[in-house]
Image (spheres, grey):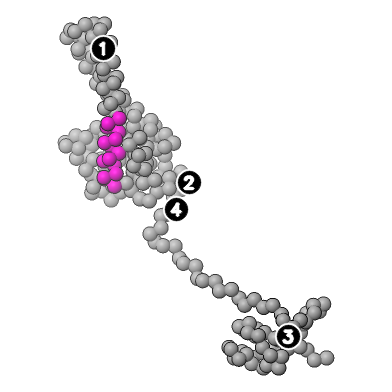
Amino acid sequence: MEQPTARFCSNCGTPLSPDARFCHVCGAAVVASPVAAGIRDTESTSFAPPTYQPPQAEPSPQSPQTWPDSMPVTSGYASFGERFIAYMIDTIILTLGFWAVGFILVVIVLGIAGSSDAAEITLGFTVAMMVIAAHWLYFALQESSAKQATFGKRAMKIVVTDDQGKRLTFARASGRAFARLLSSMFFSIGYLLALFTARKQALHDLIASTVVLRR
C-alpha cells in the first residue's frame, strides 16, 4: 500500500499539493511520511511552525550588582549633597530637642538653686553632657537599628552600612558618632573628604570603616 505523502513542508510549514516533490516557497525536498497508526488522515492537518524566540539580551554592565542578603538594595554611594541635606535635617531635629530640654533644665535648676555661680556652672555642665549624650544616642541608636538611618537619612533614602554592606553594630555606630566630632574640626574638613574619596567616605566613615549608600 502506497504511503501518503506529506501535505505540509517539513521545513517551513507551507501547504503543498499531494504530488509536490519540492516546496515552492523554500525549495526543500518533500519527504513522504507515514500517518501514525490510529490517527485518521484529514483534509487539513494543523501545523504550527516553530515559534521564533528572540535572543536573550545579556545583562547590562550598568545594572545594580547583586548584594548579600544583609545589604539593602542600593543604586550606589550617596552623594555629598544628599548627605549634607540629611545632616541639616538631623541638625534641626537635634537643635529643637536641645532647646526644649535646655529650657526645662534652666527652669528647674534656677528654680531650685536660684541664680548663683554654682547653679550656672552646674547648669552649663549638665547641658554640655546632655548635648554629647543626645548626639551619641541619636546617631548610634538609629544607624544600628533595622532602618540603618537617622530621620534625615531616611528622608533622603540613604543608609549607613559597614564596608561589607552589613548592618552596623551599636559599638561601631557609637564609634562613628564620636568620630563625627573629628570631622567637625577645622572648618568641617572631615566632611569634605566625601567629595574626594573613591567611596564618598567622610573622615568618620574612614575611621569607623562605614559607607553611606542610596537605598
**Quadrant of the image for the C terminus?**
top left
Q: Amino acid at mark 2?
A: Asp
Task: State the predominant SS element of the stretch in magenta.
Answer: helix
**Which segment did they paint magenta?**
79-93
Distance between mark 4 and mark 1 Cα atoms: 55 Å
Distance between mark 2 and mark 3 Cα atoms: 56 Å
Which of discs 4 and 1 lies nearer the camera? The answer is 1
Examine the rendered structure and indicate whether residue 148 appears above or below residue 34: above
Q: Position of residue 71 (x, y in %)?
A: 43, 45
Which of 38/57 is in front? 38
Inspect the magenta stretch and tell me whether residue 83 lies in it: yes
Residue at the disc numbered 2: 69
Task: Name the residue rendered at 61%, 76% in the picture.
Answer: 50
Q: Amino acid at mark 4?
A: Thr
Which of discs 3 and 1 lies nearer the camera? The answer is 1
Distance between mark 3 and mark 4 Cα atoms: 52 Å
Tag 2's secondary structure?
loop
Q: Earlier in the sequence, mark 4 or mark 1?
A: 4
Q: Earlier in the sequence, mark 3 or mark 4?
A: 3
Q: Residues within 10 Å of mark 1 (few under 14, many from 20)?
A: few
Inspect the magenta stretch and tell me whether residue 166 lies in it: no
Residue at the disc numbered 4: 66
Q: Amino acid at mark 1?
A: Val
Residue at the disc numbered 3: 33
Numbered label attached to residue 107: 1
User: Among all residues in the image, which is located at the extreme top?
Assistant: 113
Q: Residues within 10 Å of mark 2 (few under 14, many from 20)?
A: few
